[in-house]
Image (cartoon, rainbow, N blue to C red):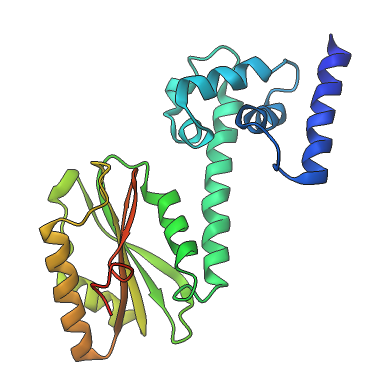
Amino acid sequence: MSDNRNGHRQRLRERFLKTGLRGFAEHEVLELILTLCIPRRDVKELAKTLIQRFGSIRNVLDADPTQLKTFDGLGEASTVCFLLIKAFAEYYLQQKTVELPIFTNNGALVQFWQSRLESLNYEVFEIAYLDAAYRLMKDGIERLEEGAGARTKVYLQKVLRSALMRGAVNFVLAHNHPSGNAQPSQTDLQITQSLHYACTLINIRFLDHIIIAKDGFYSFRQSGFLA
């Protein structure tokens, strides 16, 4: 049994080394992860059970660690492994975003904020400060506001003061909708319109306001609201 298990693990790893994750079923991806933190157990059925319960690897990584520990075979090492993988993914996306002119590659920035904001059950506003080449500045992501539900608001002076203090030439605003609906509220429209007008007066370019939700995202620039 041990030889069969080790042979199966080795075959999974060899497939990954040859082709990456191309052709892997989702439970096989999770199984591969679990082999790194559960060395002496067949984890195939556990991986299938987790995918069946949570629906996707992303939902597994977003799950509360105390909830994960209720599954037979998932101990502290496994939950720490999941947290590390998610944190490494966010760190990688942030570094990758720094290397790209994100105004011409808006998808990378959307993906970055989805990884940060999509699973939160409270509203958060963040801002990305960009240089003249549209690259993310060093330590260029700042959390401006966070709070419960729709009560959180971004104040105009705080945004502009932060941008000016950093010497940012451009910036992008992003926040999440815990309700799951990415469509902008009337408050979102007012904030965006006020910021856009104020930025024209102080020669800072407000590139986009992105709303992240479980059903997708909304870009004010892509919608034509910000020219």
Question: Is residue 13 placed above or below 124 in the rendered structure?
Answer: above
What is the count of numbered marks?
A: 0
Query: Residue 187's quadrant in the figure?
Result: bottom left
Query: Observer-nearest residue: 56 or 32?
Result: 56
Question: Is residue 80 placed above or below 217 in the rendered structure?
Answer: above
Query: Observer-nearest residue: 110 or 67?
Result: 110
At horizontal 84% and vertical 37% (from top left) the residue drawn is 14
Which quarter of the rendering shows the N terminus? top right
Question: Is residue 223 placed above or below 183 in the rendered structure?
Answer: below
Q: Position of residue 69 (x, y in %)?
A: 50, 19
Q: Position of residue 27 (x, y in %)?
A: 62, 27
Which quarter of the rendering shows the C terminus? bottom left
In the picture, measured across the screen, residue 76 lies left or right of residue 166, that is right
Q: Residue 32, can we see it?
A: yes
At horizontal 19% and vertical 75% (from top left) the residue drawn is 195
Query: Residue 28's quadrant in the figure?
Result: top right
Q: Where is residue 25 in the image (x, y as percent from the top left)?
A: 65, 31
Q: Where is residue 8 in the image (x, y as percent from the top left)?
A: 81, 23
Q: Residue 168, can we see it?
A: no
At horizontal 17% and vertical 61% (from top left) the residue drawn is 188
At horizontal 56% and vertical 11% (from top left) the residue drawn is 72
Query: Residue 165's quadrant in the figure?
Result: bottom left
